[in-house]
Amino acid sequence: MTNRLIIGMLLVGYLIMGCKKDAALPPVAPPAARIATQVVVGTPVRTTLRDSFLMNAVTVFTNRESIRATVTGYVDKTRVGVGTSVGAGQEVFVLQTREAAVLGEEILSDSSINITGMVPVVSRNTGIVTQLFYLDGDFVVEGDILAELTRPSALAIKLYVPFERGDLVRTGKRVQIRLPDGRLLAGTVGQLLPSEDIGSQTTPYLVALNTATYLPENLNLMVFVPGRVSRDALTVPASAIQTNEVQTSFWVMQLVNDSLAVRHDVHPGMRGDSLVELRGSSLNVGDRIVLQGAYGLEDSSLVSVVSKL
């Protein structure tokens, strides 16, 4: 009887200790609910995309006239200044011959000699004086360039075309020229200049303005050269396209129902201001895709559609 009592007491003690141990365990928490990411959705659209390339250019004058001294002597009078407009046949300088300077005013004023020693220099063409090389009293030799005359009608745009983009530019092509103040002018590509800029590896073309406009020389400009055209292209906003770190794969997140977004691989084509063409895609204009909020979403993500983020 004693052994049975001891064994019974031990069993009761083990049962009590086991109950206390089970009571000390914390309750098991239920699994966390999946959180839906808020997104803005839209649909692809079909439109015409045109891409253009922005190239550097500078204003140049292709026709200049050098006004030269016709005799050796001194500049007696300068009739013009830099920026002065002159007409064909207009007097621009008066030169005093070296002989007249040696004889002096008293001898030259003698009516019996009938020698003035003053030789006018006139412009052969209409234009604007852009440079003066001599002033009153300077000694000049016959043939020296006294001034340089530029014809406003000879204004052209020197377009620097990157060598790899040479296929986009050809004679007769229409381009748009943007001035530093934001104005846009229309122009037409002219002749190719037989030279290559070593530093920038560009090929220069001359572009003629379609309307007469006066611009200073060496003014830096930007020229929009139209490129390819893709008609009826399937496009999505650029914000809808996701990519990996090395930009070797691209995708959009497509909604298969009101709350599930799956990954759909795409191949981007031409890019517009805000739209990107999808080449060879099986998407349709009626399919819904994530326009905003797709960054970081995994395939088959739970989403909540909102009007805007």
Image: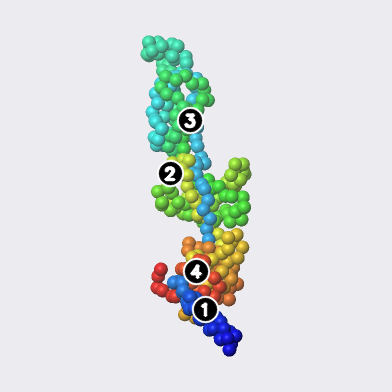
The residue beneath circle 4 is 294
Q: Label for residue 17?
A: 1
Residue type highlighted by circle 4? Ala
Tell me, yes or no, whether the two marked residues, 4 and 2, touch with CB atoms within 8 Å.
no
The answer to whether 209 appears left or right of 264 in the picture is left
The colour scheme of the drawn protein is rainbow
Label 1 vs label 3: CA separation? 119 Å
Note whether 102 is above or below 75 in the view shown: above
Nearer the N terminus, badge 4 or badge 2?
2
Note whether 36 is above or below 79 in the view shown: below
The answer to whether 105 appears left or right of 45 in the picture is left
The residue beneath circle 3 is 67
Crowding at label 1, few (<14), some or many (≥20) Cα neighbours within 10 Å? Answer: few
The answer to whether 191 appears left or right of 184 in the picture is right
Dot 1 lies on which element? helix
Residue type highlighted by circle 3? Ile
Nearer the N terminus, badge 1 or badge 4?
1
Q: Label for residue 215?
A: 2
Note whether 54 is above or below 278 in the view shown: above
Residue type highlighted by circle 2? Leu
Callout in the foreground (3, 4) = 4
Q: Residue at x 50, y 42 (%)?
A: 60
Any part of residue 11 in sight: no
Any part of residue 196 in sight: yes
Nearer the N terminus, badge 1 or badge 2?
1
Dot 4 lies on which element? loop
Callout in the foreground (4, 2) = 4
Is residue 292 or residue 205 the one in the foreground?
292
Residue 238 percent across, percent down from the top left: 50, 65
Nearer the N terminus, badge 1 or badge 3?
1
